[in-house]
Image (tube, coloured by chain):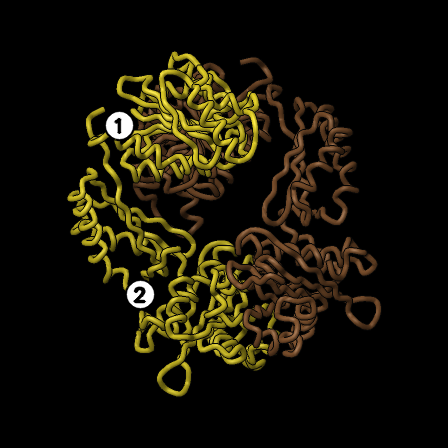
Chain colours: A yellow, B brown
Amino acid sequence: MTVGSVRAAVVTVGEELLSGATVDANAAWLGRALGALGVPVERSWTVGDRDDAIAESVLAAARVAELVIVTGGLGPTEDDRTRPALARALGAELDEDPALVRHLEGRLRASGRSALSDGLRRLALRPTPGRWLANPAGAAPGLVFEGPREGGWVIALPGVPREMRGLFPAVADFVRETFDGRLTPVLQRTLHTTGLPESELAPRVDAVAAEVGEGVEVAFLPDLTGVDLRLTTRHDGTAAARAAAEERLDRLDHALRPILAGHRFEASSGDLVETVAALLEARGWWLATAESCTGGLVAQRWTARAGSSSTFRGAVVAYHNDVKERLLDVPRAVLEAQGAVSEPVARAMAEGVARRLDAQCGIGITGVAGPGGGSEEKPVGTVWIAATVPSNGAAPCTRAGRFQFGGDRESVRVRAAQAALHLLHGMLEGGPFEPSSARAGRE
Amino acid sequence: MTVGSVRAAVVTVGEELLSGATVDANAAWLGRALGALGVPVERSWTVGDRDDAIAESVLAAARVAELVIVTGGLGPTEDDRTRPALARALGAELDEDPALVRHLEGRLRASGRSALSDGLRRLALRPTPGRWLANPAGAAPGLVFEGPREGGWVIALPGVPREMRGLFPAVADFVRETFDGRLTPVLQRTLHTTGLPESELAPRVDAVAAEVGEGVEVAFLPDLTGVDLRLTTRHDGTAAARAAAEERLDRLDHALRPILAGHRFEASSGDLVETVAALLEARGWWLATAESCTGGLVAQRWTARAGSSSTFRGAVVAYHNDVKERLLDVPRAVLEAQGAVSEPVARAMAEGVARRLDAQCGIGITGVAGPGGGSEEKPVGTVWIAATVPSNGAAPCTRAGRFQFGGDRESVRVRAAQAALHLLHGMLEGGPFEPSSARAGRE
């Protein structure tokens, strides 16, 4: 192990993780937090509440990394085995720390309770030599020891996520001080995109990154709503190095703009609703949605955000054709001639819901989510989507597109809802769906 | 290791798990699936995409368990290192399997594509000796080897959750056959409940379980929609022992019925929508929903299920009061006198949407999801919910209740949607909200 390459190993303790009663979210959180601190995680172990298993794993972890983080098993019951296991692994005594007893008694007094129970008193036991870190969110302290390898350290933290996270700033301080000059902090930036599959996006992005992305790794994080690009670079922690790292991210970010045009959106939550809602809010416009196959998914996503009542009038989930006719004024003749999944129906839904609900902007979505209901002409995954916005002229401007989504029912619905927001976003921003664009209308 | 105590160890491969870019949900799934099969997980490892790390962990895993499951690193790229690492750990050759080549070519032809790419061809490499399991959800096969310890086995599965789960039935068959008579299978039954908090449910259930639940563990699995009770018992795999275990579950299940009355529902998916939809389907009735604070959440949940078009007419998301008036005929005077969050508005919404959308059954939900909008009289979390169903008389039967939900915006919305389904369920089943019940009407 060379200077400048401190790595971490994680040992997670808990039968409930092995049995699958609990999903281990601590591991991913620690991976991100330690990575950002400049100590990437090299390997991890999950073990049950048994002294030998914990001790063995801590020793194995110390063989692959200088910093071992143990989480879990620090509570006050007999089943909490991390303290004795650490004493065993480190060849240390398990002693009661008088300062810890006073700390625990102080906590109790502050909450108006009296003497330490036997269980709580067990929290003052720790292998010696070593030190402890106060837990801002609970009783069990963090524990810090040197060893078992030369120059290595073991830090034990409670497994309760809130407590583990609450103790992390103290861990970060300790790590920065102890491994000073040997960390490589990570700087990351996430660019949100939608409407381009990873298979189209990746080659274009990789080509740009090859030219101007030196020192920056690009990861593609696809989900049903789009692909996030995560740009990662490292630096040595000095202010100058950090500024240079920011500069590397800026350079690549800027060079990617033309490629991502019409697909990128800015949203701190990563949710395109945030972006589109801000555009409506700025104009003082209302949205209403008319949804068939998405069954209210756009409305539900929109209203999941606090404050949505200032931009959202409401929605009509027009699942049955009668509802499209009665509440959205889609002409029966059009439904019969073109079918419910068609451009004129999507347009009539978007315009009808905007008119009926007195909104400037409307969305219409009609499609075949599957698994049944497909035909040769309109297979499962066929969705017509329309959006309408005010135009400078008298009539509103309505655009529509035909989409063919892959995947199961859930995938088709989620992708269709996102595509509708993307269409509206483009129209509000003058993106690829602006009136003059070749991509507007049928596609 | 004694007979009757076969245990598993899991090695999960992927840098994205160590860095925290992905939360490892496979581990918990495997823990549950292997536990149910009678092979509890003893310990697990997570490693990056490196031959030495994978090989070391597989060898360490084989020291603590007879069955080692490796997931991840089986894909077609150079970064997928599980195949060469296994060959190294097992001291085996890495050869192309002609039967696997034919299998992969057959898959390609079935999807209308032509020759195997170099990447796909790599999927036919496997350490020899060994066998493979066809992947029903993807190209990469599962791989099965004897060793590295005497009587031990290693099974490698793709890391893509859908593919890993798709291959599991073949793994289960193999494990049952190989470790015949040495498994302690788990028998579980899940009882779904809604509308009773865990703090009320648990003491009542525990009291019954103490009397008639010998040999059965009861776990409470709460989420925002309710509390599942998971009953678990073990047996030794013989038919007689299995029958006795079923009997233990039946006895406790039966004894719990009176306690859970009005709150329990049967649904293979665990989703109350399934239960209520089946009741509507059986009567040939339609549902329509009118939703304010839930923003279409009931509609969205209902239509997420395939086949919902035979029971669901549609919904009106009446976020703005104008929409409640125009599309649902809620009288303006009532909105002004009682406020939007009130019993008469909830009732008018349920009845209005059923009438307007030509459905027999209607749901109306109006409340304060927060974080803003609360008042002393109607604090955040106040929700009025109404449901209407046909009655024997001329007028439909409508019931309403006032609820006070805790938690954040998301919690209030999810709980309100579930409470609406629970109210309708009770009315259809004649549960606690039947017309004669003391709990009906205002509460």
Tell me the amino acid under the disc marked 2. Gly
> In this rendering, would A339 be left or right of B284?
left
User: Quick one: label 2 or label 1, which is nearer the N terminus?
Assistant: 1
Q: Secondary structure at mark 1?
A: helix
Q: Position of residue A175 (x, y in %)?
A: 29, 31
Q: Position of residue B440 (x, y in %)?
A: 77, 59
- The C terminus of chain A appears in which quarter of the rendering? bottom left
Which one is in front, A52 or B2? A52
Chain for disc number 1:
A
Crowding at mark 2 (Cα within 10 Å: few <14, some 14-19, many 20+): many
Which one is in front, B97 or B419? B419
Which one is in front, B409 or A137? A137
Label of residue A178 in the image: 1
Tell me the amino acid under the disc marked 1. Thr
* Residue at 68% from the left image edge and 38% from the top image edge: B202
Q: Are marks 2 and 1 on the same chain?
A: yes
Crowding at mark 1 (Cα within 10 Å: few <14, some 14-19, many 20+): few
Chain for disc number 2:
A
Could you tell me if residue A239 is visible in this image? Answer: yes
Q: Which residue is mark 2?
A: A262
Would you place residue A148 above or below residue B385 in this image? Answer: above
